[in-house]
Image: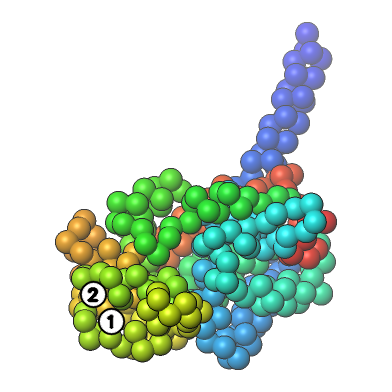
Amino acid sequence: MASIVIQFFAIFSVIFLFACATNAQLSPSFYSSTCPNLQGIVRNAMRQAISREPRMGASILRLFFHDCFVNGCDASVLLDDTASFTGEKNAFPNQNSIRGFEVIDTVKSNVEAACSGIVSCADILALAAREGVLLLGGPSWTVPLGRRDARTASQSTANSNLPPPTASLSSLISLFAAQGLNARDMTALSGAHTIGQARCSSFRTHIYNETNINPNFATLRKRTCPGPASGTGDNNLAPLDILSPNRFDNGYFQDLLVRRGLMHSDQELFNGGSQDSLVRLYSNNFRAFANDFANAMVKMGNISPLTGSNGEIRTNCRVIN
């Protein structure tokens, strides 16, 4: 009888350990022994990228967001299309929009040189997003690690899950809620638009056809964003934060108070709705915004990660092994 009990507990222990391995939680110290210099490697590569082009901080942050909202933070957004595989890069919200893939390639190459086959592309993207924010004057946060990389992607999910620039406030709240993020998280994360630029095609309707916009601001933006009848200018860029597009501050929220939100979805955050008071708070208190943004980034980074034996550690972030 005793031997049966011992065997039972031995089997149970194996099952328990396997379950823990396959459902492992993310941890900031995940690579402390296997790749101890990881964060410094990512930081140095991002510093070089941003010194060449400050906009890249915003681009990598957006890349992380567009990854996490499609089946979780699994680096699926980095996969290239092949003859037999359709990825997410050409989903409608991503076409001619997401960028920075070559920066992630460089970071991955540097990491592989130090710790071959150890660190996932998903974790590299999560760390790079934080470093970009920090290097542009924004807050830091502790990044939980241990994600693995997806072996597949979903263009259809990208088309349905990613908020369009025409989204209403209720739509934004619903799309974020579907990812486990509340309205406060949504508004704080929207503050990522305090850095970076947007294409004319994403804000043309707002500046030409809508009334909830400062008329002088609309006139300014029309100078480089021709009307729809022109058939030109789709890729012309404008700063999301008119005064400090390369500085992570609370200028975005200050712009919203005076109706200078570049896209319809931006100005929806301050349009007589439920987020008006929060926008006012963030516009006056950078620390409150920075704290909420950092907390929301951690929450977003925890969306459905692959861990344990799920997925893989890609050698090249653009293709499965």
Q: Residue 283: give x, y in percent of width and height.
A: 25, 75
Q: Do tag 1 and tag 2 residues touch (Cβ < 8 Å)?
A: yes
Residue 307 to residue 221: above or below? above
Please state which amino acid type lies under the numbered disc 1. Ala
Instruction: Say which residue appears at 30% left-offset and 51% top-offset.
Output: 170
Evaluate whether residue 228 shows in this view.
yes
Where residue 296 sits, quadrant-wise, is bottom left
Q: Residue 114 carries which label?
A: none
> Disc 2 designates what residue?
213
| Cα–Cα span, label 1 and label 2 | 7 Å
Tell me where residue 13 appears, x and y as whole percent.
Answer: 72, 29
Residue 120 shows in the view: no
Quick one: quadrant of the N terminus?
A: top right
Q: Is residue 316 left or right of residue 136?
A: right
- On the rendered structure, is 135 left or right of 289? right
Which tag, 1 or 2, sits closer to the chain's start?
2
Residue positioned 34% across, 75% down in the render: 262
Q: Mark 1 sits on what residue?
A: 218
Q: In which quarter of the image is the C terminus?
A: bottom right
Above or below for 278 versus 52: above
